[in-house]
Amino acid sequence: MKSALAVEHLQELVRIPTISRVDPSATEWTEFDRFAQTLRKLYPLCHSRLERETVLDHSLLFRWRGRASTEPAVLMGHYDVVAATDEGWKRPPFAAELSGKGDEQLIWGRGTLDDKGSVVAILEAVEAQLEAGLVPAQDIYLCFGHDEETHGTGASAIVDLLESRGVKPTLVLDEGGAIVDDVFDQVDAPMAVVGVAEKGTATLRLTVDQSGGHASTPPKFPAAVRLAQAIVRLNSRPFPSRLTATGADLMRLLGEHAGGMTGYLLRNVSWTKPFLLPILVRKSDELAAMMRTTQAVTMLEGGHAVNAMPERVSAIINVRIAVNSSLDETLAHVTRAINDKRVRVSVDSPGEPSPVSATSGLAWELLRSTIEKSFPGTIVTPYVQNGATDSRHFTRISNGVYRFTPFAMAREVRDTLHARNERMLVSSYLDGIEFYRSLIASL
């Protein structure tokens, strides 16, 4: 019965369309208020026994006082979601419908994976442990951001607040890697990939200015053509592949579980990487992104009339900067690749890679042992996360920031993140609740 109730709670919260917009004035803040009010109803013990604060009007901060506060922990997530309409979805994105039965039952909806599933699983676990009378050994903070998908101001403000109070968490756990079994086909065991760092996220703008004019008498080399040529040049010159220390650790660990020539190459990655890197880059886009800084053209702008030459055209480039690189190095590569002084390269939104958290010590060992206990037979391995999370702000106050979502995610499920038909296995959600319960009991 309790598992059925936990599913009903997730359904109720997914049905609240907490869509964050780049322009805050376009955001329906009443839905965020409704979400917070619903949490009060669904999790009464969390709200009566924990200290609760609202930060920047909508981000939520809970403090669960433990027997000591010298080595606090943070469990975090975000409850805002990216936009979705019914178009192209097999099931409406905010209906939270169930399909299938048994271990194959799915819950559909925007936010199931990113990231209401984690937020609700944390609250379910905390509510259950409060009901059982648990008093944690150390303080536990629950941090739920309201604008992770856009600006991350909520999480940043929470960190400011904690820093002002002298809070230095030993462990911070946010969304991130998951339980996967289809990244390395030579490794049979499922893998729990734990983000020990995340790439930098920056927005670059390519701009070409030119005198306008009537489209009936176009210049020989219009601004839009120059911009298109720059984009093609950039796309044909990907960033060089490199293997970070974290990547090498991942390869060696996988090599212990892989046989044949692949296992040999992985185990001896310190000298086989010149042969191994090209293989991994060709294998999949997912693996290729792990090995280099990536670049993606996400927006094109220009023109004001169908019969007028645009005076300014621009392209937005989303770059994810590898941890062994920097924004300056990224800009230098883009400028060289374009090789056209008429194309101006500027930075709309800068973001450097995060520090790398340790894969030894109390925080890591606690996380690793809890994963192995909750998901028997799983290989726990570090990796560098490609996407950005709210946890990047917490590196200011903690050296133990990790990114792991305790759900099994097949590739077809991972592909629905920020896309149509987002969904997750109900069994994975319930397993995630048990993971958080176990972790909380060990903190």
Image: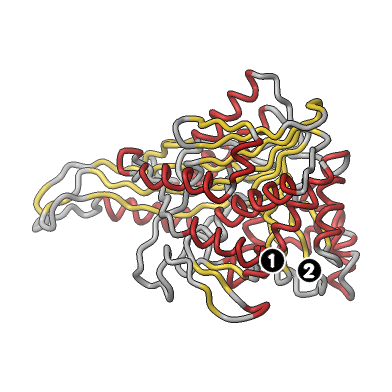
Q: Is residue 114 left or right of residue 104?
A: left
Q: Is residue 277 left or right of residue 137?
A: left
Which residue does the image show at 36% across and 44% down from the upper left?
A: 30
| Quadrant in the picture for the N terminus | bottom right
Q: Residue furthest bottom?
A: 101
Check residue 408 in the rendering and tell me which mark sits there, or answer none.
1
**Circles 1, 2 touching at the beta carbon (< 8 Å):** yes
x and y percent of residue 262 in the render? 84, 71
x and y percent of residue 318 in the render? 47, 48
x and y percent of residue 138 in the render? 80, 33
Question: Which SS class for mark 1?
Answer: strand
Which residue does the image show at 70% across and 24% down from the upper left?
A: 167
Q: Is residue 146 above or below residue 431?
A: above
Which residue does the image show at 79% across and 43% down from the upper left?
A: 134
Q: Is residue 284 above or below residue 59?
A: below
Question: Which SS class for mark 2?
Answer: loop
Which residue does the image show at 43% across and 66% down from the upper left?
A: 95
Amino acid at pointer 1: Ala
Residue on which disc 2 sits: 190
Label 1 neighbour load within 10 Å: few <14, some 14-19, many 20+: many
Amino acid at pointer 2: Pro
Whichever of labels 1 and 2 marks the residue nearer the N terminus, that label is: 2
